[in-house]
Image: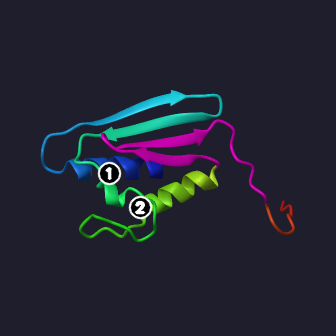
């Protein structure tokens, strides 16, 4: 949920005060449910495309540069992934159909 909200917020911000469109599409393949979020904003400048997921990189006034980095990390921790394409800017969220099994370190105790 946090990933989708952040990407939609970025899309709306990229459109700015002018009229625009944020389009959300869902599809699936054998392993993932895929959410595509596309906006009609100006897009990501070519020199910034390799930096999009880097921590502390931002083009937003007042931005922290942690939003997309955190989104990508969250998706990877759940066995999914986050990609993007430009022209039009489209972020793809790949949510695994089978949850990633989490390993528990240390002793597991039962409490009644």
Count of numbered labels shown in the rendering: 2
What percent of the width, then of the height, locates residue 29?
Answer: 59, 28
Name the residue rendered at 25%, 53% in the picture.
13
The answer to the question of whether label 1 and label 2 lie on touching residues, with beta carbons closer than 8 A, is yes
Name the residue rendered at 60%, 35% in the picture.
32
Q: Is residue 22 left or right of residue 5?
A: left
> As displayed, is residue 69 above or below residue 64?
above
Q: Label 2 crowding class (10 Å Cα cut-off): few <14, some 14-19, many 20+?
A: many
Name the residue rendered at 37%, 34% in the picture.
24
What percent of the width, then of the height, locates residue 27?
Answer: 50, 28
Query: Judging from the image, what secondary structure is the residue with disc 2 in?
Result: helix
Quarter of the picture containing the C terminus is bottom right
Is residue 44 a member of the stretch shown in magenta? no
**Between marks 1 and 2, how big is the CA–CA gap?**
10 Å
Q: Which residues are magenta?
A: 79-103
Name the residue rendered at 83%, 62% in the picture.
111
> As displayed, is residue 73 above or below residue 57?
above
Using the image as rendered, state which of residue 18 and residue 105 is in the foreground: 18
Using the image as rendered, state which of residue 45 and residue 69 is in the foreground: 45
Q: Label 1 crowding class (10 Å Cα cut-off): few <14, some 14-19, many 20+?
A: few
What percent of the width, then of the height, locates residue 79?
Answer: 65, 48
Is residue 84 a member of the stretch shown in magenta? yes
> As displayed, is residue 76 above or below residue 64?
above
Instruction: Name the residue carrying label 1.
Output: 9
**First-in-chain label (1 vs 2):** 1
Q: Residue furthest left?
A: 18
């Amino acid at each position: 949920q946090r990933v989708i909200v952040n990407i939609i917020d970025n899309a709306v911000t990229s459109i700015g005060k002018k009229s625009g469109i944020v389009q959300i599409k869902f599809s699936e393949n054998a392993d993932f449910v895929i959410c595509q979020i596309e906006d009609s904003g100006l897009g990501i400048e070519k020199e910034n495309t390799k930096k999009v997921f880097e921590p502390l990189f931002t083009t937003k006034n007042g931005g922290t540069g942690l939003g997309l980095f955190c989104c990508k990390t969250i998706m990877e921790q759940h066995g999914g992934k986050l990609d993007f394409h430009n022209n039009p800017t489209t972020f793809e969220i790949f949510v695994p159909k089978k949850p990633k099994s989490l390993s528990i370190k240390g002793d597991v105790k039962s409490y009644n």
